[in-house]
Image (cartoon, helix red, strand yellow):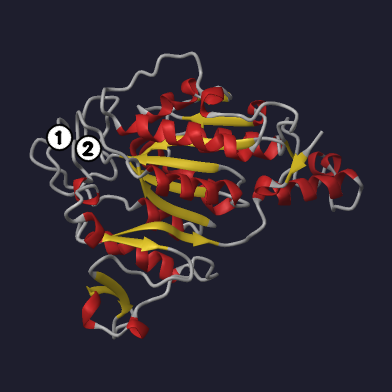
Amino acid sequence: MSETTLNGRGLSLVPKSDAKQTMKDYKSDQEVRWCPGCGDYAILAAVQSFVPELGLKRENMVFVSGIGCSSRFPYYMNTYGFHSIHGRAPAIATGLAASRPDLSVWVITGDGDALSIGGNHLIHALRRNVNVNILLFNNRIYGLTKGQYSPTSEVGKITKSTPMGSLDKPFNPISLAVGAEATFVARTLDSDRKHLQSVLRQAAEHQGTSLVEIYQNCNIFNDNAFEQLKDPEVRDDITLRLEHGQPIVSASKAVRRASNGALEVVDRASIPAEEILVHDAHAADPSVAFALSRLDEPAFEHVPVGVFRSVDRPSYDELMADQLDRAVHGKGPGELRDLLLGGDTWRIG
């Protein structure tokens, strides 16, 4: 059996003698049931056309989802899949990745599923650096339950559940992930297939947890939420492309360090080239990545997209497998019998 080191694992490859996989191989026989025009269609097509590049056998890929419109995703992938319960996809994926290192595990979730009821599961998967890829579809609204405000909805958002406007300060998913010291954090857009697939390739190659926030349009309950990033008249001016080793700029703007040490966005023509911040996605200290994540405020005057952070750290499943191996060979301290019958137990009656 052939093997590859994708995600640091021994994963079964499709034999070279077999026909090359195509997008068609990853389309299931299930009818895709999202609202016409939903951004989820674009993401599904991008993933289905990208995964054949990995060269993996389909039985070695698993897509795990929670609850929400995006969580129908596993039905439409001709791989193994698990439509789990609300917010718990990272927990289920953790168990799967830890017990089956031969699998490439992907989590499909939304801003409500991941950041509300699933918030703790998400941050603990990120801090543990479990070997899974998390795709967080962010449309800034609850779509499946018909248009309530979500943890990423802006302050003042008028919805069915906030008729006088939301009072909640929204989560910034990138800031949250960097704050949890996730080892791979990125942002992309549903309608930019080239950029989306580029980010997915990097996420798939990463050892440990990758978190990819995908701005996704809900044309029924929150249409045009990211219109500035799609409008050809302004998108090149407000989109700050993050590429490791390259200056952080848009067509007209640039990022530099302010006198107080913070990052600021200025007119590109107003400063010399040497003042423009060069992106270091591999910096061990997450502080600059966190500062970059704050540059989308005020909303969409300028928005960084790309890989914010990509650093090496042992994955949880690697460390766990090492402990188990040492325990099996008698190299670890402690015995289960000693724990159960030790001095910290007592009898009642």
Residue 184 is at least partly visible in this image = yes
User: How many numbered callouts?
Assistant: 2
Q: Which mark is residue 159?
A: 1
Mark 1 element type: loop
Question: Which is nearer the N-term, disc 1 or disc 2?
Answer: 2
Q: Residue at x 68, y 40 (%)?
A: 98
Q: Nearer the viewer, residue 98 or 223?
A: 223
Residue 64 position, x and y percent, is 52, 30
Amino acid type, label 2: Tyr
Q: Quadrant of residue 288?
A: bottom left
Q: Nearer the viewer, residue 170 or 35?
A: 35
Write down the residue under mark 2: 149
Q: Nearer the viewer, residue 140 or 122?
A: 140
Asked if 161 appears above or below 125 in the picture, the reply is above
Asked if 126 appears above or below 341 in the picture, the reply is below
Label 1 close to label 2 by CB (< 8 Å): yes
Horizontal side of 157 relative to 311 (left or right) equals left
Q: Nearer the viewer, residue 266 or 110?
A: 266
Residue 262 is at least partly visible in this image = no
Residue 278 position, x and y percent, is 42, 75
Asked if 10 appears above or below 283 in the picture, the reply is above
Amino acid type, label 1: Thr
Quadrant in which the N terminus is drawn: top right
Q: Residue at x 16, y 54 (%)?
A: 233
Horizontal side of 132 relative to 178 (left or right) equals right
Mark 1: few/some/many CA within 10 Å (<14, 14-19, 20+): many
Residue 134 position, x and y percent, is 49, 42
